[in-house]
Image (cartoon, grey):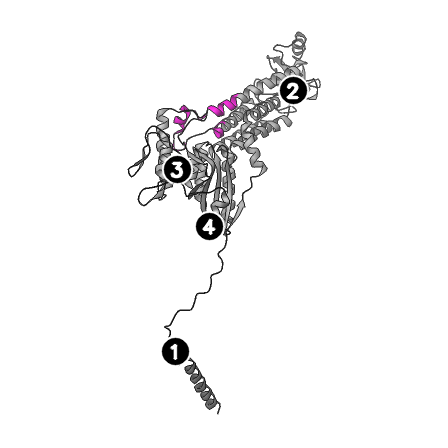
Amino acid sequence: MFRAIRFLITLFASALIGQAAEPAAGATVAPATTPAPVAAAPARKVTVYVIPVRDEINRPILYILRRGLKEADQKADAVVLDMDTPGGALDVTFDIMEALGKFHGETLTFVNKEAMSAGAFISATTGEIWFTPDAVIGAAAPVSAEGKDIDVTMKQKITSYLKARVRAISEGKGHRGEVISAMIDADYELKIGDKVIKAKGELLSLTASEANKTYGEPPRALLGAGIAKDIDALLAKKYGAGNYVIKQFQVTWSEVLAQYLTKLSPILLGLGLLALFIEFKTPGFGIFGISGIILLAVVFLSSYVAGFSGHEPVLLFAVGLLLVALEIIFFPGVAVVAVLGLVLMLGSLVWAMADLWPGVPLTTSWSGDAFVVPLQNLGLGLVLAVVLALVLARYLPKGWIWDKMVVGSTIGGAAQVGGVAPEAAHEVANLIGQRGVAATVLRPSGQVEIGGRRFEAIVEVGAVDAGDPVIVRGRTSFALIVEKTIT
């Protein structure tokens, strides 16, 4: 019964479907067509990070750019370098270029006035180069740290290396490799087809309109991807109005501070060296030693703020700091350990501030100007430290600081008698044969306490631990000569 009913319903439904499918008389049968596509949902807006690249290219700029690229790699689809720079250190420039190569999204440069020298190299690394109407780019020949010409042989090596780097990063980017080469090498002739754009004997620089002129077959822009009055106009041309979101990368106060600290390196070096000098001339370890180490560390970090923990200057500075700490904690009075540590720390500072050319042997770099500015900074720091020490010795009021300094305490009756009043020398002479206690470890130098007062002292043989009894056997121009006694 139920099967019969279901069969009748099926026949009735089939008849209805067939009637509906059959065209009316005189009607034209339309060919079969595919269903109209459903309108696609609006595409996600492109998130663009804008990172400023301003003023001279130096290590603080590298740190800012690297932090911005790491942040953008997690949150953005594209990065725009808002560039206005006269150039800067090429070793930092290559590090910036390497960092840009690690970004997974699209990279663009917006030449917001000028991209000279190192700025041109950085621009060449990005996918597209855009310009404001009055922007310029070019003049990328290598020069010394002071902006002067360098030795011919050295220049040839550097130019050859730079052109090879440019060819590597410009492959598949139109005329870019040829254009940047013409900015580096005055002897390079830039010729596209029958058109000579730059003759030999001069460096190439381009305005915005010149960079966007087309050459060759098929016609391609010389260097630029377009001209826009600002970044909003650039992104509207590239992605369409309303199809992007701008995230302005914010430079932190510490990054701005680091840029200023690099310019104050000689002053910070001088103050740090003076503080360490006072610390070495006072008993124990206190505020002067801590201040000196902090000041030198600030100089180092501001010069090498990118924080490449595996690089040689960082390691050298750490070893020097370790030696100073060993002197203070385990070997007080053994000046050679602290002096060696200080030399290593200063050497690392000079190294970190040096503009070394990548790919060029260190022996060749020493013959150039790479270390001139760092050594000048160190020299100025040393001069400042000496001047300040003389000023303190002349004008510092007598007080708790002065009384703790060895010079002050020894003039008042300690062992340093060279150049002091006769009565001081007489008092020191009377100390011979007297007994006292080692106030610090003597290996071989340190301090002893005699009659409630401290004096610089040395032992000629062996060592004396703090608290051991001693007897004065003689004196030098700067210290008492003591030996350990048995009570």
Residue bearing mark 1: 27
As displayed, is residue 432 above or below residue 192? above
**Any part of residue 487 in sight:** no
Q: Are marks 1 and 2 in contact (CB under 8 Å)?
A: no
Residue bearing mark 4: 239
Disc 1 residue type?
A: Ala
For the record, the magenta segment spans 350-379
Q: Are marks 2 and 4 in contact (CB under 8 Å)?
A: no
Q: CA distance from mark 1 to mark 2?
A: 115 Å
Q: Are marks 1 and 3 in contact (CB under 8 Å)?
A: no
Position of 335 with respect to 3 (left or right) is right
Q: CA distance from mark 4 to mark 1?
A: 48 Å
Nearer-N-terminus badge (3/4): 3
Residue bearing mark 3: 210
Given residues 444 and 171, the one toward you in this image is 171
Residue bearing mark 2: 405
Find residue 398 and report its image quarter: top right
Magenta highlight: main SS? helix
Q: CA distance from mark 3 to mark 2?
A: 68 Å
- Mark 3: secondary structure: helix
Find residue 260 and report its image quarter: top right
